[in-house]
Amino acid sequence: MREITPLDLPDMARGAAVLGTGGGGDPYVGRLLAQQALLRHGPVQLVDPMEIDDDAVVIPTAFMGAPTVMLEKLPSGAELTAALQALEQLIGKKAAYTVSIEAGGLNSLIPFVAAAELGLPLIDADGMGRAFPELQMLLPTLGGVSATPMAIADERGNAVSLETVSNGWAERFARGVTIEMGCSAAVSLYVLTGRQVKDMMVHGTMTLCQRLGAAIREAGEAHRDPVAAATEVMGGRVVFRGKIVDVQRGTQGGFARGEAVLDGLADDLGSRMEVAFQNENLVASRDGEVVVSVPDLICLLDTDTGEPVTTETLRYGLRVSVVAAPCDPRWRSTEGLALAGPAYFGYDHEYVPV
Amino acid sequence: MLRLGIDVGGTNTDAVLIDGQLVLAATKAPTTSDVTTGIVTAIGRLREEAGFDPADVAAVMIGTTHFINALVEGSRLAPTAAIRFGLPATSALPPLVDWPAALSKTIGGHSYLCHGGHEYDGSRIADLDEQEFRDVLDKAVQGGARSFAISSVFSPVNAEFELRAAEIIAEQLPGAPVSLSHEIGRMGLLGRENATIINAALRELAENVTTGLTETVLGAGIQAPVFLSQNDGTLMDVDHARRYPVATFASGPTNSMRGAAFLSEQSSCAVVDIGGTTTDVGILQNGFPREASTDVAVAGIQTNFRMPDVLSVGIGGGSHVGSGPIPEVGPQSVGYRLTQQALVFGGDQLTATDLAVAAGRADIGDAARVAHLDPAVVRAALDGVAGRIAEVVDRMRLSAEPIPVVAVGGGSILVPEQLDGASVVVRPEHYAVANAIGAAIAEVGGEVDRVFSVEPGRRDAVLDEARQEAVDRTVAAGARPGSVRVVDIEEVPLAYLPGNATRIRVKAVGELSLGGNDA
């Protein structure tokens, strides 16, 4: 167990945005929300999953909606605790811990707000080891945990609860409710036991985010290559360095889908890379050949600064490095690939692990 | 048709007189603390040099770092109330949330939230509570606030609450300056709101400075309209500058790059601007500076201004030169005291300028005073300088292809005829006053940044609509209709939103219309 203070947050937000693989929300807003909560309520205890009791009640907290909307309509802060408390009422139990469902600039930092306000410790883990666009894409889904009962709350005081036959249906209904709430809502879902957290979640994610963010910052300060530093922490490799020469976007099925085209620089001169995304980066192809795809991580980093580039901020002329990093091995199982592999997103290539 | 371009920098006030594409005269005068005396001196020198009739001047364009300096120094700022419509949302991050404590205190720390604001689709988060707003105003005024910054959630989609707030302030506090966020910034509440608060805090200073500028120009016998240059290289009139001083923030580097493009006739190149203390390198694409990709913090405040992407290194004409066989140059500098302290000017500090004179690259001051320098050491030091400048250019350029390098600024004598990675090195005539020339040739611009509903098959029609709106705004801002062109289009579909909601940003620019005789 260790205490997290506002000083820990900038590195953590930066690292979380890298693991967000283009999605997962804005790290600046995420960091500020957590910082304000910690300044008001004091530090939050970060707890290793192995330290908690098997029968402890763990209730995750997150924001759901459009990242661009959340940059404009900022939260009140009250909706997060409202969602968590609505879910407590549904199950008739109090949460002993909260935890984040995904790694991302906003959703890794949001649980600090609920933890600080309610005095709950936060577990050093997450449900994906990265960010994915849909709420059923959690490792606990593979373990048979239901996303519902689930509570969705807005800043007005509305709270909607869901009970569904599958986690896929939870995604569909929750998406509809979120849109009605102004495309941004707090959610609490996937009630877990301590045992389930130990068995099914990715351990150490918050610490990894912080290490990753610190590695990028320290490399920059020491005039070393920040992209290389990030790649080393993630155990990945740089698959391309280039500049963005085109970004095509379209809205399909309520998601931002699109593709960024990169022309190679330095060692990759003369080559071209295409990165397809649905909020998160899904597939990277070099000269027409797939080189990385979901569920592995495809992270775009600013070549000079190492700062993560989210899909919303992709733009012509940006010099980026494409880093491929391995996903949690459970995503590589038949069931994991069915839930979040290339075929689920409509691609027909075989998944080849990085 | 004569244009007068003036750049008020921290050290020098540069002025140029331009007729069409021709530079008739150029001069430098020391900047004075009141700004206007320096301008009067510079205009006087131009008249001595070119002997023009003030009645023939069609426009005066001024670039100034005065406002950004005021913010950085935290001085001359008005006590400001920051009032946001967004409740019951947004209260987790109230106005001024991430400001440096000292600066927030300087402007009075007045941060207020009211009910209101809109959803992404333009519907209301909450209705406006006029009594609540009037109470907030009373409290702010009692607290000493004199300028008002109003923001509202999604005001770029629907500005009704900001506009109503302005009406109420006009009723209750006639004449009080009001800054509205939808007129100042882009999507992204905190960045837009911060820019609005900065703008509000500069309004009183802007009143003084713009009045001073207008009177100074009139005092010189020039009846022509006065314009100020903005961050993106376009112009605003004095009345606009009085209301939107924040728009001048990055005009310095922008003007120097645009001036370099004009003088060298290069529209895509690297511009190396060497002053007394630093070298600033930027990239021009199609005649406009490449903008920074990330949000820019100004004086520690996060904003979403568009600023030119500039990389700086501590090398300038006044840089101190170390000792040894390959001496270090910079980052320490004699700065504006170059003309007293450099060897060639009779001083006793060896500077980068002395090296250039010793190497025969420049004829400044008394070359005899540097004749004793070892030519091998001079060459080694200058090679080191060239290497570091080449490195910065290399970091800024986007392809491995060599690109043209245009060297401007008083210190550009440090750039050699050949530079690694440069297809050609151009040091145009009048290189020392590129900033003022950039101001003199600035254009006017207009921008649209809104969420559009793009139904299937209607994308082209919607884009045309957005383009037309940008062009209309440019003409309304004073551009000659036939000269307006769209320079940037960006589409961002909003994730998860129904109805193919897409944020479309279009920027257009055109030549300034100066009455009927400029067709």
Image (cartoon, coloured by chain):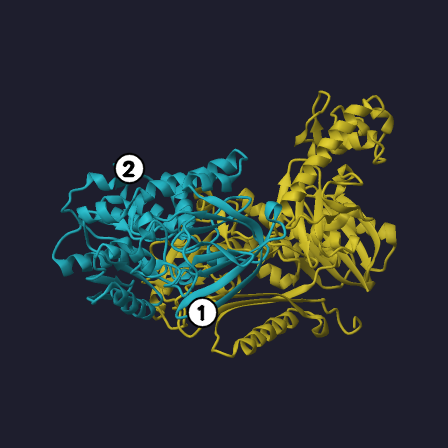
Q: Quadrant of the N terminus of chain A?
A: top left
**Could you tell me if residue B187 is visible in this image?**
yes
Residue marked by disc 1: A251
Label 2 marks a residue whose chain is A
Q: Secondary structure at mark 1?
A: strand
On screen, residue A245 versus residue A33, left or right, reads right
- Residue lying at the far front in this picture: please name it: A350
Dot 2, crowdedness within 10 Å: few (<14), some or many (≥20)?
A: few
Give the mark count: 2
C-alpha gap between disc 2 and disc 1: 42 Å
Chain for colour yellow: B
Camera-near label (2 vs 1) is 1
On screen, residue B40 versus residue B470, left or right, reads right
Label 1 marks a residue whose chain is A
- Camera-side residue of B251 and A298: A298
On screen, residue A335 versus residue B351, left or right, reads left
Residue marked by disc 2: A3
Chain for colour cyan: A
Q: Residue B163: x and y, percent?
A: 46, 69
- Camera-side residue of A3 and B250: A3
Is B494 placed above or below B33 here? Answer: below
Which residue type carries mark 1? Thr
Q: Residue A10: x and y, percent?
A: 41, 43
**Could you tell me if residue A120 is visible in this image?**
no
Residue placed at 60% from the left, 75% from the top? B468
Q: Residue B74: x and y, percent?
A: 52, 44
| Residue A144 in which image quadrant | bottom left
Residue placed at 75% from the left, 31% from the top? B382
